[in-house]
Amino acid sequence: MVILMLVVGLAVLTVGAELLVRGSSRFAMAMGISPLVVGLTVVAYGTSAPEMVVSVQSSLAGQSDVALGNVVGSNIFNVLFILGLSAMIVPLRVSQQLIRIDVPLMIAVSILVLVMALDGGIGRLDGLLLVGGLIAYTVVAIVTSRKEQAGIQAEYEAGFGIGKKVPSRGELGLNLLLVVAGLGLLVLGSHWFIESAIVIARELGVSELVIGLTIVAAGTSMPELATSIMAAIRGERDIAVGNVVGSNIFNILGVLGISSVVSADGVRVSEAALQLDIPVMIAVAVACLPVFYVGHLISRWNGVMFFAYYCAYTASFVVAETVPDFHRTFAFVMLGIVVPLTVVTLLTGVVRSIRQGRSSEPLSEELSASA
């Protein structure tokens, strides 16, 4: 029965992701909103429902530190594991908006968490500021996208004389129903999948530590994982990348913000989170900028790099608990060798991309002058 529940959970996740991607892309076209913005808002907020439920319940139960760990862990998982795995399947194109606006915002709110947490907690006032930021971000993103899409449509009509087809209420209702049904199946499928996976892992003798660091940590991000992979396969790459970036922004502004508001004492922040987990979350967010900038593409190699870093991040906890004597050597290899090499590689790619852009400017000017 447990194995059957695992298979059914995975199947429900797949069907839910298919319905969500199909419904959201059609709904975006019907409402005059770009698929990227739908991925950043509707899809991202919906797939973050498990994180919201877990974090708010933890805060109400007086376990606010769990809420912080859930948000930070999910953000790290979203970028390193989900984007990494999605890019390994198919390289992902990155839009200019993500590079100019959304990724810098993700970096800014990640740093804001660290600043707010320096006094040992994120209070109710901090939470209200975070929630207010989420509302403002959502409104601006949707309004701006509608204006841009309307401008593009006007140019298309002027050039080709073909107007936009106005969707019927039935079409809008059907697409919205697909989105809601997809989200519901994602939440249900992720619950079945994680519960059965925990039972199987215990039967196989896997330690509680490893279960917590892998299955439980990744469980609340299963909707994002299924949605991004399905979007990448279906060619909706704006939704695939926007889902991850939008989920990370929502996790901080929405999930952490609301958790801080409903908790009597706010969200506590441990020394371990201040020294390791939050800085890693910031570093992962910052790493997105040079990766996205070079060629506006998350290549398969970038995907492998992200995926490998998540494996190393998870392994560091397992090594620390199971082989403490080796942990210092492991940390030295990662921080002293692997991370610096990665930074140099990313910076080299950015410099080359900038030089290529500058060298192409004179050529484009000559072509425009001759024209």
Image (spheres, helix red, strand yellow):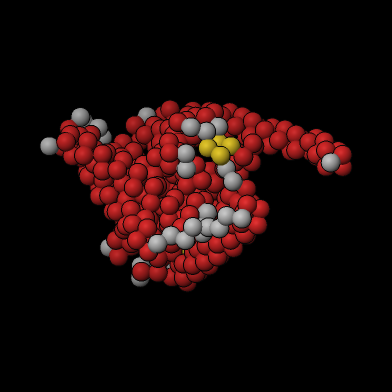
Q: What x and y, as percent, mark residue 301? A: 54, 28
Judging depth in this view, the residue of 149 and 220 nearest the camera is 149
Q: Residue 27 occupies which quadrant of the picture? A: bottom left
- Whether residue 77 is visible, yes or no, is no
Q: Residue at x 18, y 39 (%)?
A: 5
Q: What x and y, as percent, mark residue 249? A: 49, 55
Badge count: 0
Q: Is residue 284 above or below residue 41?
A: above
Image quarter of the C terminus: top right
In the displayed orientation, state which residue is furthest to the front: 161
Q: What x and y, as percent, mark residue 327? A: 44, 31
Judging depth in this view, the residue of 206 and 238 nearest the camera is 238
Q: Residue at x 47, y 39 (%)?
A: 235
Q: Is residue 309 left or right of residue 197?
A: right
Q: What x and y, as percent, mark residue 50? A: 32, 53
Image quarter of the N terminus: top left
Q: Residue at x 34, y 47 (%)?
A: 19
Judging depth in this view, the residue of 6 and 363 nearest the camera is 363
Q: Is residue 74 left or right of residue 249?
A: left
Q: Is residue 108 above or below residue 331?
A: below
Q: Is residue 220 above or below residue 349?
A: below
Q: Is residue 180 left or right of residue 125?
A: left
- Whether residue 17 is visible, yes or no, is yes
Q: Residue at x 80, y 39 (%)?
A: 364
